[in-house]
Image (spheres, grey):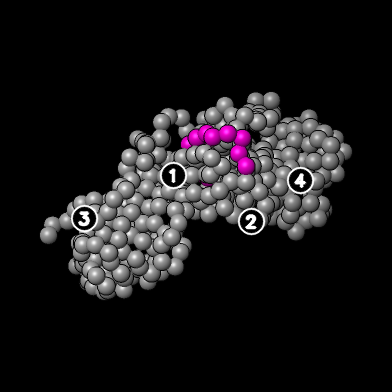
Amino acid sequence: MKTVVNGTDLSSAVAKVSKAISNRTTNPVLECIKLSVKGDLLTLTATDMEIAIETSIRAETFMEGETLVLGKLFSEFVKKLEEEDQVELNMTGDDGRLKIVYSSSEVYLSCLSADEFPSINKEMREKAFSILQKDFKDVIGKTVFCCSQDESRPILKGALLNVKDNVLTCVALDGFRLALAKKNLRNSSSDFKVIVPARALNEITRLLDRDEEEITFISEDNVLLIEVDGTTFTTRLLEGEFINYNQIIPTEFLSTVRVSRQAFLNSLERATVVAKEMKNIIKLDVKENYINVQASSESGNVNENVLSSLEGKDISIAFNAKFLSDALKGAGDEFVNIYLNGSISPCVIKPYSGEEYLYLILPIRIAA
């Protein structure tokens, strides 16, 4: 194997695939990046058996071949080669090492055989949907923060992507809160559901930097695949039955509050400064013309009013301030509607108009 590539291109490609290098494994192959030279391309691949990332860059090839290099070491080293116009990757010797030549210098790195490296299936075509990149990023940004971190409930560590009637609905929940967002699709092959790990969804959004272009998602054999700008990303899907979220969301309410999203968020964040000592607990007194926000701890207290309009009964209720703040940040609108049924029932946050997103948050019971 012998090829010459641009240092900036190499560094950028390694940075992409290194997100899939395994940090905890007994298999040394999964700690590596596969380098494959064929034709005028150098293809780099990494996988931890949950996600896999493959990308290619232009190369001047003198000899085709492939090898594995230790991922973290190679990643750290090529960062230092971004200023080099030409970087030669050469493995033509018999010592099993990769020679990296740049300027008037050369470095040798240990390698492994590529024979045992897992292959990536890029021929999937069973189920698919296409969506604008900006729309997909918006849906994930509105929901994925609600995915659970609890290892005992692995199904909740992912988000449900439900394609139905050319609409994508994304749902995430962790047992204390739920987030739902919808977007219209450009096209879809059929209705289907998949549960995608939160980590994979976050990594996918980092690959999307052309908002007005479409991205196509393909699912087959419990794997989800995308291809974007010469990069292929695959992830294993979570297996199991997702919670029937429609049974959780109330449809009737005693009170509806309309409030400026940013004004309410600012108040919550000020209250959180004090509430941190008390597990972020804040109390809301919802009145006809305002929401009274209260937080108390040994360090101090906050008591302020946020202008709002109420239809229905006054209600006093307590929440984890972070959960409310996360929802308001995700919403993004100028005004939101907050729906309530009492001090021990969950609240629901929706847009002032439309059904593009929904947040449900369980209250905290506190002594009167």
User: Rounded to the nearest whole Å, what is the CA distance between mark 3 and mark 4?
Assistant: 58 Å
As measured in the structure, the alpha-carbon distance from the residue carrying label 1 to the one carrying label 4 is 36 Å
Give the residue drawn at x 35%, y 68%.
259
Count of residue discs? 4
Q: Which is more toward the observer, 209 or 30?
A: 209
x and y, in percent, of residue 175 in the image:
32, 43
- Residue at the (74%, 54%) spot, across then down: 8
Which circle marks residue 342 in the picture?
3
Q: Disc 3 and disc 1: Cα gap in Å?
A: 25 Å
Q: Which mark is residue 65?
A: none
Q: Can residue 31 be seen by looking at this rendering?
A: no
Question: Are the residues at dot 4 and dot 2 in contact (C-beta closer than 8 Å)?
Answer: no
First in sequence: mark 1 vs mark 4 = 4
Kindly identify the amino acid type of the residue bearing the numbered disc 3. Gly
Label 1 and label 2: CA atoms lie apart by: 22 Å
What is the number of the mark on residue 57? Answer: 4
Disc marking residue 211: 2
In the image, which residues are magenta? 187-201
